Amino acid sequence: MLMTYVPLEKLLDQCEHSIYKLVVLASKRALEIAEGQPKLVSGSASVKPSTLALYEIAEGKVHFKKAKAEK
């Protein structure tokens, strides 16, 4: 069963307290879901990919990965 509201604080905890990183992570995951990647949380077909992406982030199933710095 999906949550009806995801607190912003819970989402920011998953993205190092950066709204920018949260937006990037959620948009990339939403695009993956829209292109047919399997959903990591249960949800009806009427739930939008962007909403599913936020639920996945809140549950800790999708993480922000730091890129290695080039030298």
Image: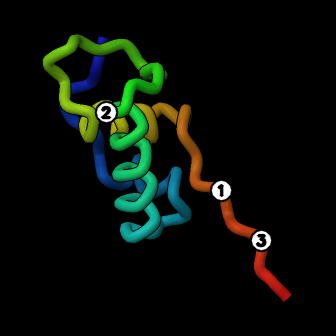
- Amino acid, disc 2: Ala
**Residue sitting farthest toward the front:** 35
**Residue at screen point 39% across, 25% down:** 36
**Residue at screen point 43% across, 21% down:** 39
User: Height in image: 23 above or below 48?
Assistant: below
Q: Is residue 50 visible?
A: yes
Give how far across and how far down residue 1 sits, in percent. 30, 11
Residue mark closest to the camera, 2 vs 3:
2
Measured in 3D between alpha carbons, the distance from the residue under mark 2 to the one under mark 3, in whole angstroms, is 28 Å
Mark 2: secondary structure: helix
Please identify the quadrant where the C terminus is shown. Answer: bottom right
**Residue at screen point 47% across, 32% down:** 59
What label sits on residue 68 in the rendered view? 3
Horizontal side of residue 64 vs 58, given as left or right: right
Horizontal side of residue 32 vs 62, given as left or right: left
Residue hosting label 2 = 34
Residue hosting label 1 = 65
